[in-house]
Amino acid sequence: MLMGIIKKPSIRSYWSSSPICSTPIYPQSMSRRRYENILRFMHFSDNSLCPPREHPQFDRLYKIRPLITHFAARFAEAYTPGRNICVDESLMKYKGRLGFKQYIPSKRSRYGVKVYKLCDSESGYTQAFRVYEGKDSSLDPPGCPEHMGTSGKIVWDLLFPLMNKGYHLYVDNFYTSVPLFKLLYCFDTAACGTVRKNRVGFPAQLVRTRLKRGETSALRQEELLAVKYRDKKDVYLLSTIHTERSVEVSVRGRAERIRKPVCIKAYNRHMGGVDLADQLLQPYQIMRKSRAWYKKVAIYLMQIATHNAFLLCKKQTP
């Protein structure tokens, strides 16, 4: 953790005895050789017990599965999130060879291991997470209907412990779908998210409607609201939380105020929980070059745990 605060060019330099750049806390805690040996031999599972690749029980994350299970349980039991929560993905930087490495150009790291997260929208606390294992990995969360696509199953898997508790969920257009929102509503979980205009069930009439900038068109079917809003481009959104009401909002860098659907204003406010968590972690990154992907993921999960612990401490002593 301290290495994330005090940045140095190499591990060796932390144990330097030079009066100019020495940091006494490191040699006082342990020798450099001991630290390097701990890092070198760090393991979380017995590799001799790992099922072979062709075995039905084969697990790509076997090397860190105990750590994932431990943190997932502790994150969930230590904190009760506020009413507004969000699901999004993070990318842990990794450029080595790995079967489930992802390329996401919109992320700062671009290449790495993708982690799906459910976070508290206000604080950025990571309540639940799931490490992506590849397209061919099976995902069959308990209680989830078979007809749900992969994105819907991810949301169900992360959200399941919080269902039937009145939460408001915010997601982006990768996860938003009419079947998912209707299903969540049956479990006392309302949702709001941007949606792709070609999603099954999204009203074609709304897509064909031509709007000028600042105009809104909306259709409702029972609990589900579909909205089209014209900003610089068309924005499509589904919600089981909001009404068709619009509010005045200020425009950054301009004196004028414009009207915007309340659902879009709420989405912009509450969708950033995962990005907030990533931003708060970024200045304290301690990642160094390593060929062992599981060590990098393990350290990344430890950093998330540290950030969560900080938020809990901050809540106790504001």
Image (cartoon, grey):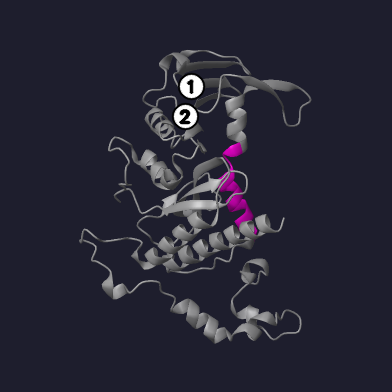
Residue in the picture at 62% in, 58% down: 312
Three-letter residue code for mark 1: Ala
Q: Is residue 283 visible?
A: yes
Res 110 visible: no
Residue 252 in the image: above or below residue 77:
above
Asked whether 131 or 66 is in front, the reply is: 66
Instruction: Confirm whether the magenta stretch covers residue 182.
Output: no
Please tell me which residue is depicted at 38% across the width and 60% down the height of the picture. Answer: 98
Say which quadrant the C terminus sits in.
Answer: bottom right
Look at the numbered disc 2 and give the secondary structure of its residue: loop
Predominant SS along the magenta part: helix
Residue drawn at the location 54% of the way across and 86% of the way down: 33
Q: Residue at x 63, y 54 (%)?
A: 280
- Which label lies toward us, 2 or 1? 1
Q: Label 2 belongs to which residue?
A: 195
Query: In the picture provided, is 170 more to the left or to the right than 45?
Result: right
Q: What is the span of residues highlighted in magenta in the rendered image? A: 270-283
Quadrant housing the N terminus? bottom right
How far is mark 2 from mark 1, CA to CA?
9 Å
**Which mark is drawn over residue 226?**
1
Give the x, y percent position of residue 116: 45, 49
User: Which label's residue is closer to the chain start, 2 or 1?
Assistant: 2
In the image, which disc is placed on residue 91? none
SS state under label 1 = strand
Q: Is residue 160 left or right of residue 274?
A: left
Asked if the residue at tag 1 contacts the one at tag 2, i.e. Cβ–Cβ closer than 8 Å, the answer is yes
Q: Considering depth in this image, is 177 or 223 the residue closer to the camera?
A: 223
